[in-house]
Amino acid sequence: MRRLIPASLRARLALVFGVGTSMVVLLALSLLYLVLDHQLDAAVDQDLAARSDDLVAAVRTHDLGAVHGDPMAQLYGPDGTPIATAAAIRGRVLLTPTQVRAVHRTTFGDGTLPPRDTGGPMPLRLLSRPVGDSGQVLTVALPLSAIDRAGSRQLIVLAIATPLLIIALAALGRQLLRAALRPVGELTRQAAAISTLDPDRRLPEVPGDDEFARLAATLNGMLSRLSVAFQRERAFVDDASHELRTPIAVLRGEIDLALAAADDPAEVRESLIAAQGQVVRLGRLAEDLLLLARERAGTLVVLRTPVDLTDLAQSEASTLSRITSLTIEAYGDPAPVDADPGRLRQVLGNLAANSAAAGATTARVTVTTDRNQARLEWADNGPGFPPGLLDSAFERFVRGDAARSATGGAGLGLSIVRAIVTGHDGTVELRNGPPLGGAVVTVRLPAGRPGTPTPEHRDPPGPHSP
């Protein structure tokens, strides 16, 4: 069955159009034939009725010559015997006496004319009616052979016209389908020609405002988005390769030095310590990239437990002050949230590393709440974000000035901050200005249910890439 159905959409539409058109044409012409046949019968009956009226009027004036001159008429007496007969059927009767006596009103019917010496009975269309109160009956007739010939001619004409009309409509439908689907073929060829080597290439615009024009515009919009995503992914791969190249080169150099100084334990130890630092840097970069990849894939694991955001900020501020060059103060009222304490500490650690890399000396954490959300604001007294960086600071491998780059960070800190906050169904915003005149990062998280937060398990703080 599937082999009988064309694979091409154009062929399927043409098939459906052809079959549908054929059925409609056949139905329409069949109805036309029935209407014409009915009209022909009605015309015959009208002719019989007109002749009957004329003959009845003549009979009432005792003019039987009108009956003799009619093509096919007969006047009967009350007993059913013919009184006057048309010359063309002299010697034969249209009705039997029993049929004559059964006529009480104007009646149409079909009958036959008895045969002559040669030939068979002739089919007739009859109209019989009483003539006044005299008991006489007048019958007029018309041979059905003429009607049958007219019907046959109509049928022959329709039989010839039907296939020609179907073929003409099918050809017209094919041309219409070809013209209508031409933009689809062009879009298909152009789309097949687009490759990753020319991501800026677009599909041709389809004139008008129909479905195909909107499809072309939609596909071009999709290609634009894919091009942007492709460029971002390519930039990400380039940046990741650049970040990995330096520690790997240093690690290789230190290993070579250790192998060259195998007889000098102090030199070997110094090289291994330096190599260990590069391994830590590589591990940190791999963990950050893995976190961002999981966030993008929607598989970032966030363990939600009741946490007091103010308590966590105050305890983490004390820890971060000891391991960074920042003086960090934390303020706020109790702010319960359902969140992952370890991830939130990672957010604060990345913000502290980012501020320290920018040259800030003081940072302030302020926590406020309302009925729907908890708000954590991190502010420092550094130079703030460069004006051109505010819109792209959350992108991966984005750095600010040379001071930030000199710290050796990979530019993933704020990307990780946004990933973690988004994983908590929150939002994060950047700006410069009050309260300390430098960078300001505002984190908003859904407020948790009031209650006693679970005791925090404080992991040893670790550095995070800015």
Image (tube, rainbow, N blue to C red):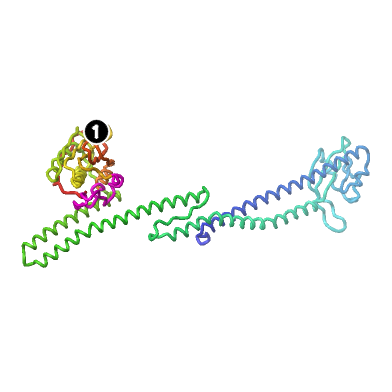
Q: Residue 360's spot in the image, x, y percent?
A: 18, 43
392 relative position to 114: left or right: left
Task: Name the element at disc 1.
Answer: strand
Q: Residue 342's spot in the image, x, y percent?
A: 19, 44
Instruction: Please tell me which residue lies in front, 319 or 382.
Output: 382
Q: Residue 2's spot in the image, x, y percent?
A: 50, 60
How dense is the environment of label 1, judged by Cα within 10 Å: few (below 14), some, or many (20 and up)? many
Residue 1 appears in the rendering: no
Residue in the image at 78% along x and 51% along y: 147
What residue is shown with label 1? 369
Region rendered in magenta:
387-415
Answer whether residue 6 is magenta in the image. Answer: no
229 relative position to 92: left or right: left
Instruction: Please tell me which residue lies in front, 258 or 60.
Output: 258
Q: In the figure, residue 417 lies in which quadrant? A: top left
180 lies above or below 336? below
Residue 364 appears in the rendering: yes
Q: Main secondary structure of the magenta part?
A: loop
Answer whether residue 407 is magenta in the image. Answer: yes
Q: Residue 194's spot in the image, x, y percent?
A: 42, 59
297 relative position to 225: left or right: left
Instruction: Please tell me which residue lies in front, 126 or 185.
Output: 185
Tell me which amino acid carries mark 1.
Thr
Q: In the figure, residue 364 lies in which quadrant? A: top left
